[in-house]
Amino acid sequence: MSLIKKDYLFQDVTILKGVGSNLSKYLKKKKIEKIKDIILNLPYSETDRSKVQKLKDLEIGKTQTIKVLIKKLNFPRIKNLPNKIQCEDDTGKVEIVYFNSREGYLRKIFPINEWVIVSGKVTYFKKKLQITNPDYVAPLEKQDYVLKNIPKYSLTKGINEKKYRTISEQVTRNLPEIEDWLGKEFISKHKLLNWNESINKLHNSKDSKDKKSKSFRRLAFDEIFANFLTLSQNRERIKKDKKFKRFSNKLSNKILKNLTFELTTSQKKVLKEINRDLESSKRMFRILQGDVGCGKTIVSLLSIANVIESKHQCAFMGPTEVLSSQHYNLAKKLFKNLDIVVEFLTGKTDIQKRKLILEKLKKGEIDLIIGTHALFQKKIEFKNLGFVVIDEQHKFGVKQRSELALKGGDECDVLLMSATPIPRTMMMSLYGDMDKSIISEKPSIRKKIITLSKPEKKIDELWPFIRKQINEKNQIFWVCPLIDDSSFLDYSSVKKKFKKILEKFPSNVGFIHGSLTSDEKNKVLQKFLKKEIYILVSTTVIEVGIDFPSANLIIIENANKFGLAQLHQLRGRVGRGNKQGTCVLLFKDSLSKNAIKRIKILKESDDGFFIAEEDLKLRGFGDITGFQQSGIKNFRFADLLIHDDLFKLAENYIKQIEETSSLHKYSFLLKLFDKADIINVDDF
């Protein structure tokens, strides 16, 4: 197959017949820019135009097809009046009405005393049957083009069905015969179709609506496989040989002896896995997952001590200034009386201090630098950076984490951490390029958070309980879904709730939401941390990472509107000290069956991974654990629940081909699903 033919699908849509600059502008609104986007824009339904109806049997308001004789053409000379074509069959009469159409064109498609096929929506006006601006008009010799089930695509204003169908058929008709990247034996064994056949079926049958059809399953498998292949190549790109092994555990053992508590079995296991990577000849590229409050940070700092002892620098990046500051304070406390130099750097660090820190980093006089994304600016140079730890990495996609991993050079080990529990069935889909460690238990000093539910109409019963918490020097989070009142949604707003609580507890309340600047958020959080305020009214911006040991009560309004995993994350903001934590879920009176199930599961379990699995079952792959907000891209065709077997099949297939196949064979597939640029495939 020639490169020109194969490259056809990756050309701009403007090379297609009938697609000018105006139409291409509308297609772009539907994210259709290249010809392959038309291939992947599957019909969501179909219109049945196959049955020809007699005029006496027409149903008003329905799209129907008729066979009629042209009797008269009426073209009024008064501006803005419609053109009308009088038609009939042996059972009645109908008017075909056109607005803003050329007379010459209508005379051509509606020749007097000829029979034509017309298909469109039937209306009734002034005691007459009408079809206005019909979708299709065809002479009898071309009736087969109309008399069929016609694919229905999701379109935008400016593109009509007939025009788009012409373009789509032009593409499928000219589809090059692609040499399939899956062998015939594999396709047959797993009851799939070859690529060309599956694409044609998806656009010319009901298969696009049936996620279990052979053709849809083939497309879903290709999408999963392209994703897994990208992760596999990313892993190969990053996990290269390194010259220096970084491991010496004298410092970490010394720190462990001075701790007032013992690490959990799970923490010890994960620390061994990280240490094994550090003394390996291959670069570390590992994700450390752990539920809220499981002690990931202490494990990462112990591994950092091992690297520092082997005379290499370390960098620890947090997502926000507040969280990074907490990591800095913990590191200072942990490394006290040890010969370890720790510094803190953010975008707001004083210019003079920043200059001094940069000089020291370059000279190797700083062992550990902790801060925000400012750590990865171009101006920052390390003398011998050996280990990078990135907290709350869920904000990064495959490409971003690849770039972060490569920033430290070929000699740098990388550990990413996440407190967002991922269902085990999704791990390969999201982190197939990384080794995985999981801390599955919480420190014994942490008490299980008591979870209660209460209808909002009984909210007044909470005030005495809140007053008691404040008297005992405990702090409270109060979470609302929206910033402002909405006339469309019956949710509480942060501003409205803030005013109400302020009336009850003057000078004890602050509020924070996503629309505040970073400085404004930090000021409020610092006040809360210093106990200058006792109640923090907030949106979900407090969901991940922030550690306030005195916060022991969280109240979540409209709890039924949140997903299970998100509720669990919010709940994890309290009970982080040695006191009992309580979570109160407020809800409306009318709860769906799913909402009742979610609240029941949350009250019974505090295992984030179990909760994430249950969330997947209840809500499906598309909306799980708030991934849309976290930047984790959804699959377009594959569905984890429906195509579970395909995910497993793709995972096994990747293992088989990793060592035997070159990337060139799959370059078309990677380009089809926009993966080629992530791993720099330039051989297509």
Image: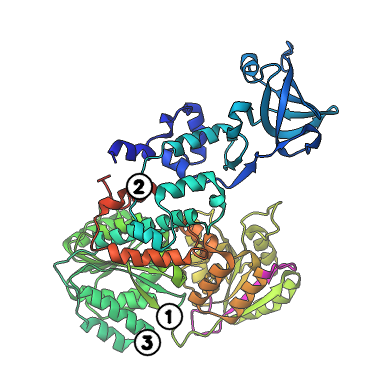
Helix, strand or loop at label 1? It is: loop
Residue at the spot of label 1: 440
Measured from the top left, where is residue 200 in percent x and y?
47, 45
Dot 3: within a 10 Å radius of its alpha carbon, few (fewer than 14), some, or many (20 or more) residues? few
How many tags in the picture? 3
Dot 1: within a 10 Å radius of its alpha carbon, few (fewer than 14), some, or many (20 or more) residues? some
Helix, strand or loop at label 2? It is: helix
Nearest the camera: 303 or 628?
Answer: 628
Residue at the spot of label 2: 671
Quarter of the picture containing the C terminus is top left
Q: Answer left or right for 582 relative to 292.
A: right
Q: Which mark is residue 265?
A: 3
Task: Give the residue displayed 54% in from the left and 61% down from the top.
Answer: 623
Farthest-out residue, right: 127
Helix, strand or loop at label 3? It is: helix
Nearest the camera: 408 or 313?
Answer: 408
